[in-house]
Each structure stands twice: as structure tokens, then as C-alpha cells.
Image (spheres, grey):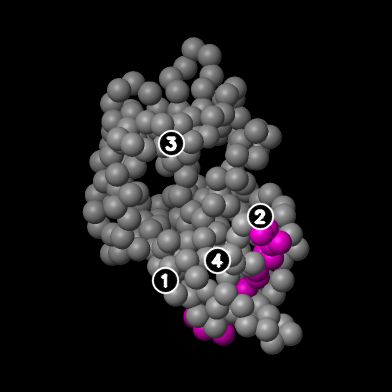
């Protein structure tokens, strides 16, 4: 997935009110950018870090920049926009780039299911149960090489696990797909200390037959692509 506009580098001043971030462009101009991430962004919002912003000239948008990437300045990047995984994954699914899901013939995003929820992707093929795929963006890493989800308490995520459990019990298939928006991790696990309720719901879902798949991303200031599969360690 290529960015619509060329990203511009900046220095983070502060992130606040969850969806706002003040930053300083290289020419010294201070701007406010939209931060499309409702999580805690633990380890990714320290003042002074190098970030990349996507400018826009849309007259309908009040903020003229969107925060897309954290540059760790060691050759690694983290994508902070939680809308990116679904867009990148849709492109990868359509191109049959994920071997585990390549034999599904129909890919439908945002299909209603459960209790006022929408599944990220509903995959179907002939003579087989439907597959409900819930996608989560993973950006937390507190130890080298280890990606963790979630980075804050997520009652919404726990609800989704319960609904996927019911999907399996009703005869269809369900999958949690954790997309690691970092280039410096080689495995994924749960941050059970951050949200033990989510971890419990996860274990119930897995026992019921919900599948787990994890992938990393290839991230540069030009694009974000689905990378390779990663082991999920529980």
C-alpha cells in the first residue's frame, strides 16, 4: 500500500487527546496532525522522536497532516495509523499473497455480524464454512523482538473475541489476524499484564477453535506492505 502523498519528516512535540499530535517540521514550522490511533501508543509518543507525516490538501479536513510512521532512526519503523492494516491486508488478500488464505474465492470487508459489530473480512469459498477474520494492529514492543497486543485495555477487542467464539460454535470458522506494524519484531504474544480480561477471552476463543495468524509489515516512508508470517507465542 503506497501512501497517497509523499510523507514529510518531523519531530514530535506531544501527542494528546488520543487523536491529536503537535509536531515540528524540518523548516521549524509547528503543526497539529491527526493521530489515527486510539491506543496508548506506549513507547511511540515520547517528545523529540522522529516521525513521518502525510500531508493533504482536502478542504474538508481541518488538519492538514496525518501521523503515519515512527522512525526509530536505526533502520526500523513502526506504523501508527490503525486504519492501515485493513487497507494493506485487503490488497494482499486480493492478490492472494497470504498462503493460508489464498484459496478463498470471495473477500467481503466490513460485514455485519454478532451484536452490532462488523467483521473486518468475511472470506468464502465453495463447499466450505465461511471464515470470519478479525484484524488487530500490533505496535507495542517492550522487549527486543517481541510484539505484544494490546497496548491498553480493549473492551471492544474482548467483545470481538466473544463473537468469534460464537461464530465457531455455530459452525463457521473464525480467525484473529494480528498484523505487526513494526519492522523490529520476530514473534507476537499477548500483553496479559495490560489486559488480563482480553487474555482470558483469547484463551476461551482458542479453545473453541478460533484460529490465530500473525504477519509483520515492510514499512518505509513510501509504503507499507504485508511482510512475512510470524509465530504467535502464548
Indicate which disc, 3 or 1, sits on the residue closer to the N terminus. 1
Q: Is residue 19 visible?
A: yes
Q: Quadrant of residue 12?
A: bottom right
The residue that appears at 54% across and 83% down in the rendered structure is 13
In terms of secondary structure, where does tag 3 sit? strand
Q: In which quarter of the image is residue 59?
A: bottom right
In terms of secondary structure, where does tag 1 sit? loop
Residue holding disc 1? 17
Residue holding disc 2? 224
Q: Residue 34 carries which label?
A: 4
Indicate which disc, 2 or 4, sits on the residue closer to the N terminus. 4
Indicate which disc, 4 or 1, sits on the residue closer to the N terminus. 1
Determine the residue located farthest toward the front in the rendered image. 59
Q: Does the magenta stretch include residue 51?
A: yes
The residue that appears at 43% across and 20% down in the rendered structure is 129
Local packing at callout 4 (Cα closer than 10 Å; few below 14, some 14-19, many 20+) is many
Q: Where is residue 8 in the image (x, y as percent from the top left)?
A: 72, 71
Q: Give the range drawn in magenta.
A: 46-59
Local packing at callout 2 (Cα closer than 10 Å; few below 14, some 14-19, many 20+) is many
Report the Cα–Cα distance between label 4 and label 3. Answer: 25 Å
Report the Cα–Cα distance between label 2 and label 1. Answer: 26 Å
Instruction: Give the vertical position of 162 relative to 217 (above or below).
Output: above
Residue holding disc 3? 119
Indicate which disc, 4 or 3, sits on the residue closer to the N terminus. 4
Determine the residue located farthest toward the top in the rendered image. 127
Q: Which of marks 2 and 3 is in front?
A: 3
Indicate which disc, 2 or 3, sits on the residue closer to the N terminus. 3
Report the Cα–Cα distance between label 2 and label 4. Answer: 19 Å
In terms of secondary structure, where does tag 4 sit? strand
Decide if residue 14 is on the left or right side of residue 1.
left
Amino acid at each position: 500500500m503506497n501512501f497517497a502523498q509523499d510523507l514529510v519528516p518531523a519531530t514530535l512535540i506531544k501527542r494528546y487527546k488520543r487523536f491529536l499530535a503537535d509536531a515540528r517540521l524540518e523548516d521549524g514550522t509547528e503543526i497539529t496532525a491527526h493521530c489515527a490511533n486510539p491506543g496508548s501508543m506506549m513507547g511511540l509518543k515520547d517528545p523529540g522522536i522522529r516521525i513521518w507525516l502525510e500531508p493533504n490538501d482536502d478542504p474538508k479536513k481541518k488538519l492538514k497532516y496525518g501521523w503515519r510512521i515512527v522512525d526509530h532512526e536505526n533502520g526500523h519503523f513502526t506504523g501508527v495509523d490503525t486504519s492501515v492494516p485493513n487497507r494493506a491486508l485487503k490488497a494482499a488478500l486480493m492478490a492472494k499473497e497470504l498462503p493460508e488464505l489464498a484459496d478463498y474465492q470471495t473477500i467481503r470487508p466490513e460485514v455485519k455480524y454478532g451484536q452490532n459489530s462488523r467483521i473486518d473480512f468475511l472470506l468464502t469459498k465453495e463447499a466450505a464454512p465461511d471464515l470470519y477474520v478479525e484484524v488487530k494492529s500490533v505496535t507495542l514492543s517492550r522487549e527486543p523482538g517481541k510484539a505484544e497486543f494490546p497496548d491498553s485495555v480493549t473492551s471492544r477487542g474482548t467483545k470481538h473475541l466473544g463473537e468469534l467464539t460464537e461464530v465457531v460454535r455455530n459452525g463457521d470458522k473464525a480467525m484473529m489476524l494480528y498484523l505487526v506494524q513494526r519492522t523490529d519484531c520476530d514473534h507476537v504474544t499477548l500483553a496479559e499484564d495490560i489486559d488480563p480480561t482480553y487474555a482470558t477471552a483469547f484463551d476461551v476463543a482458542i479453545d473453541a477453535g478460533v484460529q490465530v495468524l500473525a504477519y509483520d509489515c515492510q514499512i518505509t516512508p513510501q509504503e507499507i506492505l504485508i511482510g512475512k508470517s510470524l509465530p504467535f507465542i502464548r
